[in-house]
Amino acid sequence: ARGSARHDAYVGGEWSLKDTVRYLVFAHDCWRGQMLLDDGPFQRGLPNTDLTTERTGTPAPAWGEETHTVANCVDTLMREHSEHRRFIERDLARILEEG
């Protein structure tokens, strides 16, 4: 039980592992599902298109309609994953140190 609760641990007042994973699913749904595919989340593959092609959609209802290139959408998604993986690794190391 102790190990299973670690995904809810907060380090330095920041998001827990569970919060981070939820956010990454949200980012994936917004940028890949809504902007790139305009078809909802969890579809197969990226569209076969030139990376300079523009897409208009609503990544999240609160943000309203936006226009971005495919390259920008992919870049945003990759940066989100990269940065949040760094946060996860940092926070898990701290949690394990505190034991």
Image: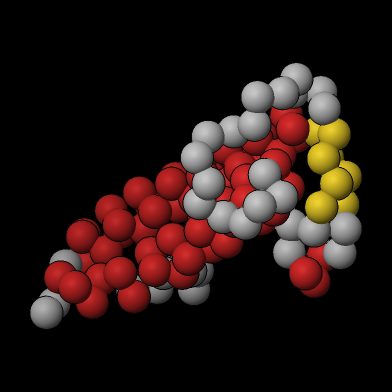
Q: Position of residue 58 (x, y in %)?
A: 80, 58
On the rendered structure, is 24 left or right of 9?
right
**Image quarter hosting the N terminus:** bottom left
**Residue plotted at (74% across, 32% down):** 70
Q: Is residue 66 visible?
A: yes
Q: How is the image coloured?
A: secondary structure
For this orientation, the residue located farthest to the top is 50
Q: Is residue 20 visible?
A: no
**Location of residue 47 with respect to 87 vertically, above or below:** above
Q: Position of residue 32 (x, y in %)?
A: 63, 46
* Depth check, front residue: 93 or 70: 70
On the rendered structure, is 73 left or right of 1?
right
**Residue plotted at (53% across, 46% down):** 43
Q: Position of residue 39 (x, y in %)?
A: 66, 52
In which image quadrant can residue 30 be found?
Answer: bottom right
In which image quadrant can residue 78 be found?
Answer: top right
How many numbered markers are drawn?
A: 0
On the rendered structure, is 13 left or right of 27?
left
**Location of residue 47 with respect to 50 vertically, above or below:** below
On the rendered structure, is 30 left or right of 93?
right
**Residue plotted at (85% across, 46% down):** 56
For this orientation, the residue located farthest to the left is 1
* Depth check, front residue: 75 or 9: 75
**Image quarter hosting the C terminus:** bottom left
**Residue plotted at (71% across, 50% down):** 38
* Depth check, front residue: 23 or 54: 54
Q: Position of residue 59 (x, y in %)?
A: 74, 57
